[in-house]
Image (tube, grey):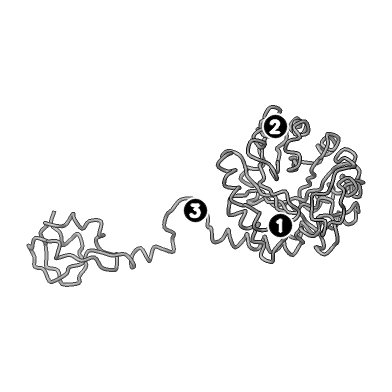
Amino acid sequence: MRKIFNKKNFPDPYIIAEIGVNHECSIKHALKLVELAKKGGAHAIKLQSYKAENLASKYAKAYWDTKKEKSKNQFKLFKKYDRFSDEDYYKIFKRCKKIGINFLSTPFDNFAVDYLNKYVNFFKIASADITNLPLISHVASKKKPIIISTGASDISEIHKAIKTIKQKSNAEICIMHCILNYPTENHNANLLMIRHLKKEFPKTTIGYSDHTLPDKNMNILTSAYLMGAKIIEKHFTSNKKLKGNDHYHSMDVSDLKIFNKKLHYIKKILGTSKSKNFIKDELVSRKHARRSLVASRNLEKGYKLKKSDIICKRPGTGISPYHFNKIIGKKLKKRIFEDQLFSWSHISK
C-alpha cells in the first residue's frame, strides 16, 4: 500500500487551500493565490479541473445561495471558469514546486484524471461524485492515494465508494466529512460526524472539507481538528469581498494565518503524551501537596499502633497513605512526637 497520510512526517493537520476556480481563469491571479496560500501556511493548494460540457446539463439548476452567486444555471457558471489547459496547470504546478507547496486539483472527468496524474501525489474526489463510480474507479486505477469528500452522502454511499476504490487499488484513502451547502450555516457543520467516520472506518484517515463562512477565530476549523480531522480543506481567495463564485465562503491569507496560529496554541496545550502520567513540573507537587502518615499524638517507643494514632497530612515526603493499614498493629522502634511524619525507621518489622 502506498502511504502518504500516515507517514510520520505528514503534517497534522494537513491544510489544503482550495483555490477551486477562484482564479477565474487568470494565470496571474492563480499564481498569486499559490503564493498567498504558501505565505498563510497551507501545505497544498487545490484547483478544480473540468469542462462544463462534461460536467453539467444545460438544464441543471443552481443549488447554491444565489444571493451570493447570481448564476442560476450550473452549466453557465461552470462554463465561465473551464478555460485552463494542461499547459496552464503545468505553470501552476511549476510555481508550487518552486516555492514548496503541493499541487492538487480535483478531476471531474476521466480526461482530467489522465492529465493531472503526472502532477499530483494523490487525488481528491468531490462530494458530488461520491456516487459516480465510473469516475472513482478510473481515479483508483492510477494506484495513488485518494481523498474523497462525503458531502450530502449517507454511510452506505461512502461504503460503496470505498469498495469501488479497493477493487482497483490498495492505496491509502482519506474520507472527508463535508456538508454540501454553499455556504454551510455554522449550526449545520455537524462536526460530530467526524467521530462517527473515525468509528466506522477506524483504519482510515479522516479529514474535513469546510464550506462555512470564516469567522475571526477560525473556530470551525480548529474544532474539526480537535474532533480528529487530520486533513483540513477550505476554499481560498485573495479577497473575500469579490463577487460570485466561491469567494464569499472562502478564507483569505489572514484567516489562514489565524488558523495556523490557533493550531500552534492548541497543539501546545494538548501536549505530546498519549497516556495519562504526571509530568516533570508536577514532581514538586507530588512531594509537597500529597499526604504522609503523621502521628496524631506523642507516642513512646514500643507502643503498638492503632488507627487513632495516625492521621494523613501534608507533605507527602514520609510514608504514603497507601501503607496506612500496613503499619496498624506494628510496634514503634523509637519515640515519635505529635505531628511528626512517620518513617520506616520508626516501624518494627
Mark 1 lies on residue: 212
Q: Earlier in the sequence, mark 2 or mark 3?
A: 2
Query: Which residue is pictured at 58% across the width and 58% down the height?
Result: 267
Query: Which residue is pictured at 75% across the width and 40% down the height?
Result: 123
Mark 3 lies on residue: 273
The disc labelled 1 sits on which kind of residue?
Thr
Given this view, does label 1 or label 2 mark the residue nearer the observer?
Answer: 1
Distance between mark 1 and mark 2 Cα atoms: 29 Å
Label 1 crowd (10 A; few <14 / some 14-19 / many >=20): many
Residue 245 appears left or right of 83: left
Which sits in the foreground, 197 or 282? Answer: 197
The disc labelled 3 sits on which kind of residue?
Ser
Q: Earlier in the sequence, mark 3 or mark 1?
A: 1
The disc labelled 2 sits on which kind of residue?
Ile
Which sits in the foreground, 82 or 238? Answer: 82
Tag 2 secondary structure: helix
Label 2 crowd (10 A; few <14 / some 14-19 / many >=20): many
How far across and down, in percent of the image, does residue 75 sit?
Answer: 89, 45
136 up-or-down from 41: above or below:
above
Query: Which residue is pictured at 17% across the width and 65% down the height?
Result: 310
How far across and down, in percent of the image, does residue 106 sit?
Answer: 79, 43
Give the numbered dot on residue 165. Answer: 2
How far across and down, in percent of the image, does residue 127 sit?
Answer: 73, 43
Q: Are marks 3 and 1 in contact (CB under 8 Å)?
A: no
